Amino acid sequence: MNWRRIVYPLAALAFLAFAWNSYGWPGVAAVLSGGVMWVLLHFNRMVHVMKQATDRPVGHVASAVMLNAKLRPGVNLLHIMALTKALGVRQSPEGEEPEVYRWTDTGGSHVTCEMENGRLLRWKLWRPEDDASGEVPEAGEALAPAAPAEPRGGPAAH
């Protein structure tokens, strides 16, 4: 059972009761105005995220590794869409729990997210194997240092 469906309406009723007991009708009007402002702010955020997602291909993310690093359990799908700026490709059948979505980057890496009750339950990063060595460096593992770059004008002749 989703506890948010019970706690949030009870908290709203408690605020209204407190406002009525403390300030009467002006208090109720203030609490209702605050509630309407909260709904409008969330609606505005949702529209902004959806507008960003319309400009991107479905299931595409700039970097699957960076998405993997930014995810945390319990965030909602709208938060993930704000991170990726794209809708995910649905992997699970419609109406089945957990819902599974996938975002892929241009290198072939992808992040698969499992959502239960609209919240991120778990996710997995998959990276294609490197052709040369057969191994893929883990997140946080240092790569081979790059050769130092020469100055723009070439080596200095002294």
Image: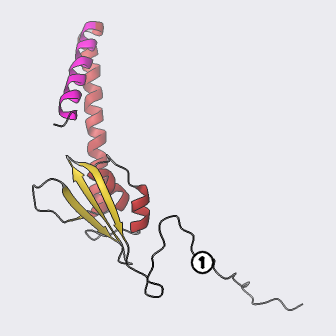
Q: Position of residue 33 (x, y in %)?
A: 27, 26
Front residue of 72 and 9: 72
- Residue 3 can be seen, yes or no: yes
Judge left or right: residue 154 versus residue 146: right
Q: Determine the residue positioned at 52% across, 64% down.
A: 140
Q: Amino acid at mark 1?
A: Ala
Q: Position of residue 76 (x, y in %)?
A: 28, 48
| 67 over 34 or under it: above or below | below
| 120 over 133 or under it: above or below | above
Check the picture and name the quadrant holding the N terminus: top left
Magenta-span inclusion, residue 16: yes
- Residue 55 can be seen, yes or no: no
- Residue at the far right in the pictured view: 158
Q: Main secondary structure of the magenta part?
A: helix
Q: Determine the residue positioned at 27% across, 13% down.
A: 18
> Which residue, given by chain and number where applicable, does mark 1 sit on?
144
* Magenta residues, start to end: 3-21
Judge left or right: residue 26 versus residue 125: left
Q: Position of residue 75 (x, y in %)?
A: 32, 47
